[in-house]
Amino acid sequence: MLLKGLAASLLLVCCAVTAAPADEVMALLRQQQAAWNQGSIDDYMAGYWHSDNLRVVSGDRFRYGWESIREAYRKHYPTREAMGQLTFSQVDIKILGNDAALVVGRWSLKRDKDNPSGAFSLLLEKINERWVITHDHSSD
């Protein structure tokens, strides 16, 4: 009986460990969505790798560096109204290893004047025990 209970406990731990990275990545996306919808670009940027090597590709533009990208967001979304309400959908997370994940999905903004939307792909890496976005490619 003790062995059966131990085996069941071990199975639960193994399953939890396997599911944890995808859950952690999804939690990061939910935090970003909430920060955006509260109008906080700084909190939204907390999901990104704070490094000069961070890369964001949007349309035909390549941007590098956390500070540069944060300033671009501030310029393009100067007010909460301009930011609108962000929704992620059709999110698919593929864990690539213990410290890397690929996420693809769709994004949409609901604003008074329009409702832009598009697709995204993200490379997330676990750096210093924390999942962060190291590469973001978004399109309309």
Image (spheres, helix red, strand yellow):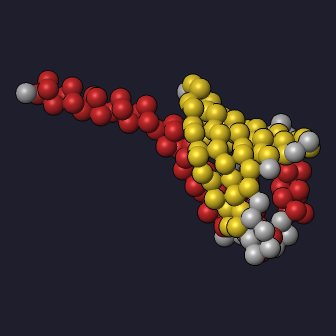
Image location of residue 120, percent across then percent down: 72, 44
Q: Give the tally of numbered discs.
A: 0
Pick the residue in front: 92 or 3.
92
Indicate the quadrant where residue 93 lies. Answer: top right
Indicate the quadrant where residue 76 lies. Answer: bottom right
Pick the residue in front: 99 or 29.
29
Image location of residue 90, percent across then percent down: 58, 46
Q: Tell me, yes or no, if residue 129 can be seen here.
A: no
Q: Residue at x 75, y 75 (%)?
A: 112
Whether 98 is drawn above or below 107: the answer is above
Indicate the quadrant where residue 84 lies. Answer: bottom right
Q: Residue at x 84, y 42 (%)?
A: 57
Whether 44 is drawn above or below 64: the answer is below
For residue 92, side relative to residue 4 (left or right): right
Q: Report the residue that reaches farthest toward the left.
A: 1
For residue 53, side relative to residue 15 (left or right): right
Whether 126 is drawn above or below 80: the answer is above
Q: Residue at x 67, y 48 (%)?
A: 106
Image location of residue 105, percent across then percent down: 64, 44
Image location of residue 132, percent across then percent down: 67, 42
Q: Tell me, yes or no, if residue 2 can be seen here.
A: yes
Which image quadrant: the N terminus? top left
